[in-house]
Amino acid sequence: MQRADASPMAATRWRHLPNLLTATRVLLALPVALAIGYRDYRTALVLAALAALTDAFDGFLARRFAWQSRLGELLDPLADKLLLVGDASMAPSELLEPWGALYRYENDPEAGRDWLLRLARRWPRAAWLNPEPPSA
């Protein structure tokens, strides 16, 4: 007797799993950004890690079983961009005020902006801080 999940019908039933995982990643973008905004970094880390796992798994499934779709082609980069914007959201106090820390337990009299500028000067190809166009 053949198992039900070995049929071609079962394979087509699972065909949309990568899109569901990608949609989950889109939905995780807001909670990640909110957790960062509320300085609940542990929750933000767990949610971002879950998003990363869904990203890896949906890509694996789509490639392994040829389950690519037009919706997936549109949603996947959108999910990545939404998570990136959410992760990059920082409170103005972390960037501009003295004692504004980039890390929760850091007590440094420099503003976070100064740290970011120092990183960008040290590794100009690795750090991008929305540079202004060069003046003519």
Image (cartoon, helix red, strand yellow):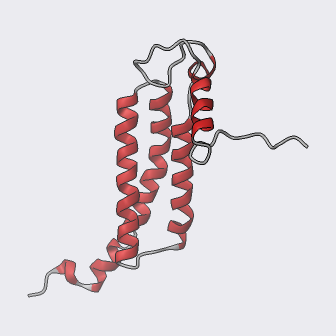
* Residue at left offset 14%, top offset 81%: 3
Residue 100 pos. (x, y %):
54, 17
Picture quadrant where residue 123 is located: top right
How far from the left and from the top, in percent, is residue 94? 56, 21
- Picture quadrant where residue 6 is located: bottom left
Whether residue 118 is situated above or below residue 4 in the rendered picture: above
Check the image and name the residue furthest to the front.
122
Residue extending furthest toward the left: 1
Tell me where residue 16 appears, x and y as whole percent.
40, 69
Q: How many marks?
A: 0
**Residue 131 horizontal side relative to residue 33, left or right:** right
Query: Does residue 2 appear to the left or right of 84 in the view shown?
Result: left
Residue 56 against residue 9 in the figure, above or below = above
Residue at horizontal 8 percent and vertical 88 percent from the top = 1
Query: Which residue shows up at 46% across the image and 56% down it?
Result: 23
Quarter of image, res 45? top left
In front: 97, or 120? 120
Residue drawn where x is 36% and y is 33% of the image: 43
Task: Please name whichever residue, 27 or 94, is drawn nearer the observer in this view of the structure.
Answer: 94
**Residue 51 x, y percent position in the rendering:** 40, 49
